[in-house]
Amino acid sequence: MWSKYLLVFASAMMVDIVPLPLPPAFTIMIFLQIYYKLDVWTVISVGVAGSILGRYILTLYIPKVAGKIFNPAKNEDVQYLGKKLKEKGWKSQLAILTYSLLPLPTTPLFIAGGMAKMKPFFIIPAFFVGKFISDAIAVIGGKYVAENAPSILEGAISWKSIAGITIGLLLIIALLFIDWRTLVQQKKFKINFKIWK
């Protein structure tokens, strides 16, 4: 039985290691919980732990990847944004918590944090609280829907999932192409497409 929970952990971790906005880890958690008839709260706990480990690993390797594919100016720009975020203290934690509660991909948050060379432990506590609450709602809701609907796959590709992936991609594009230093320091919106090495 524990091998099934290990599968939940590994699946959630793998989805959240990737620096692209994939379908959220809770979709895999819902599927495995229903398919194997696993305990909901154990699935949520194990799945969230896997997600957190995946995001932690993402923040560790993304600075190296960013350093190789983006020019120094873009990396300095995102690092400046991270520095400003750290200066906000509890307000930043509240923003991370709020963002984690929303049905938006958290990939851009961790890409930004990693590129900004922020310590993962600055992001993870608030992310954990938001992730646990939002995943618990999603998995319990998914279990309810599966038990009360003819097929869980009918809603797998919906306008909400497509919108979530689209918003995630747009946030990554905004992170990469907006000149954040100019925006914060001079209050001028500037786009820079020359970010690659």
Image (tube, rainbow, N blue to C red):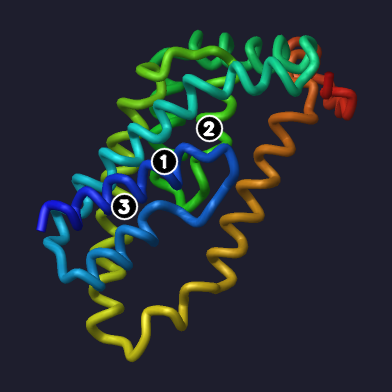
Residue 109 disc label: 2
Q: Position of residue 16 (x, y in %)?
A: 44, 41
Crowd around label 3: few <14 · some 14–19 · many ≥20 (10 Å): many
Q: Quadrant of the N terminus?
A: bottom left
> Is residue 35 shown left or right of residue 77?
left
Residue 74 disc label: none
Q: Amino acid at mark 2?
A: Leu
Find out whether the residues at labels 3 and 2 contact each other: C-beta distance under 8 Å: no
Residue 100 disc label: 1
**Mark sitting earlier along the chain (3/1):** 1
Q: Position of residue 188 (x, y in %)?
A: 84, 21
Quarter of image, res 112 = top right
Residue under label 3, please give it. Answer: 135
Q: Position of residue 108 (x, y in %)?
A: 58, 36
Q: Is residue 34 above or below residue 181?
A: below
Find out whether the residues at labels 1 and 2 contact each other: C-beta distance under 8 Å: yes
Q: Amino acid at mark 3?
A: Asp
Quarter of image, res 100 = top left
Secondary element under disc 1, as helix, strand or loop, is: helix
Q: Quadrant of the C terminus?
A: top right
Crowd around label 1: few <14 · some 14–19 · many ≥20 (10 Å): many
> Is residue 119 shown left or right of residue 183?
left
Query: Which of the two residues, 26 or 94, is positioned nearer the viewer here?
Result: 26
Secondary element under disc 3, as helix, strand or loop, is: helix
Find out whether the residues at labels 3 and 1 contact each other: C-beta distance under 8 Å: no
Query: Which of the two residues, 128 or 69, is positioned nearer the viewer here?
Result: 69
